[in-house]
Image (cartoon, grey):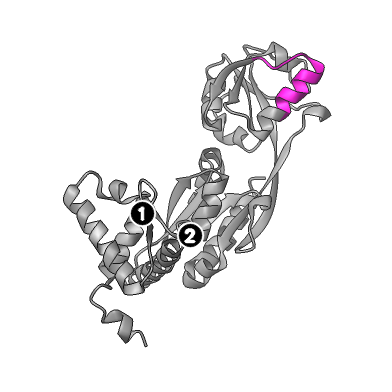
Amino acid sequence: MFKHLANQSGFSLERLASLCEVAEAGSIGQASRGDANRQSQLSRQIAELEAVFGIALLARQSRPFRLTEQGKELVQAARQFFQSVDDLQKRAGDEAQRVVLGAGEALIQWLLFPACEAVKEEAEDVVFAFKNLDSAGLVDGLQRGELDLALIRPGDVTPSLANTGDWRYAYAPFVPKVLSRSSVELGVAELGRLPWALLEGRGHFRQFLEDAAREQSGGIHCALECSSYTQVAMAIQTGKYAGFLPGFASGAAFASSAAVIQRPVVKAMRYERTLTLAWREATLRARPVLEKVISELKRELSKRF
């Protein structure tokens, strides 16, 4: 059936694997890691594949070279083939199969990691790998087959993706007792009084807080900027800063600390988001192990909201 393709001199599994390696690294230069001989080999192997298919796999007008849309399509097909064969080999040898999950750093640390540890008790033949990516990277990773599953917002689910779960969570203020021992609802005025550790940039939630503070109290007291919610949690633990975190962080981030109070908020400051577990149907069909993982992971995640 595939004899004509398989017998062509420029086509081989090694060349396909090299193309996937370049796609994973982002460029030939990054894939070769400074090795001039390896860089030359990768360039030659991709050129040989281009000759077989009669198409450009690399956009050579860009610097560094990037994959063309047809190159990405071939990588996706090759990656799916290699993954299916790898799964078969591992099942035959009673080895654990690797499942790659994507999410933001806080979701990995406070949700996926504990949930996956519980899933492994029911699915011992699975090894999990986590990738910390932003929203665009998660969707792209699913579509390109680099991720098996991802926690994303429902609004980011594209027609090519399937999903399950509708988990809502709110952001809550966590305040060290040395700054305030109050346990009543936190009001807008305290945004200007307490020293806050906030995420850097102009994210939706920070903009929401700044707008609320500007309307009623004149502004928010940003005493520290962080690049992740896990950094915000570390700042809170110093006792010098208050911070907003997803509500599910309470048990994971401050389980052993009685020095931090999770405060309720007034209605004007309630901010919620929703998560869903997404995957590509083609990946699910190619990897039967995912069906059980999705079911078990959904069950475990539902316990944490």
Residue 161 image point, x, y percent:
60, 62
Q: Which secondary structure dominates the residues rendered in magenta? A: helix
Residue 276 image point, x, y percent:
64, 53
Asked whether 67 or 207 is in front, the reply is 67
Determine which quarter of the picture holds residue 43. Answer: bottom left
User: Which residue is drawn at the image coordinates 47% and 71% (left, top)?
Assistant: 286
Q: Earlier in the sequence, mark 2 or mark 1?
A: 1
**In the image, is 243 to the left or to the right of 263?**
left
**In the image, is 135 to the left or to the right of 211?**
left
Q: Is residue 186 something one can see in this rendering?
A: no
Q: In this view, does 222 lie above or below 205?
A: above
Residue 206 image point, x, y percent:
66, 28
User: Which residue is drawn at the image coordinates 83% and 30% (left, top)?
Assistant: 267
Count all numbered tags in the image, as a single digit.
2
Q: Is residue 277 above or below residue 228?
A: below
Q: Does the magenta stretch include residue 103?
A: no
Determine which quarter of the picture holds residue 41. Answer: bottom left
Which contiguous range is marked in magenta?
Answer: 208-221
Checking the image for residue 195, the label placed there is none
Disc 2: CA contacts within 10 A as few (<14), some (14-19) or many (>=20): many
The residue to which callout 2 is attached is 144
Q: In this view, does 9 lie above or below 15?
A: below
Checking the image for residue 60, the label placed there is 1
Amino acid beneath label 2: Arg
Residue 182 image point, x, y percent:
73, 16
Amino acid beneath label 1: Arg
Query: Is label 2 in a helix, a strand or a loop?
Result: loop
Q: Is residue 203 something one can see in this rendering?
A: yes
Disc 1: CA contacts within 10 A as few (<14), some (14-19) or many (>=20): few
**How far apart, in angstroms, are the residues tagged by discs 2 and 1?**
21 Å
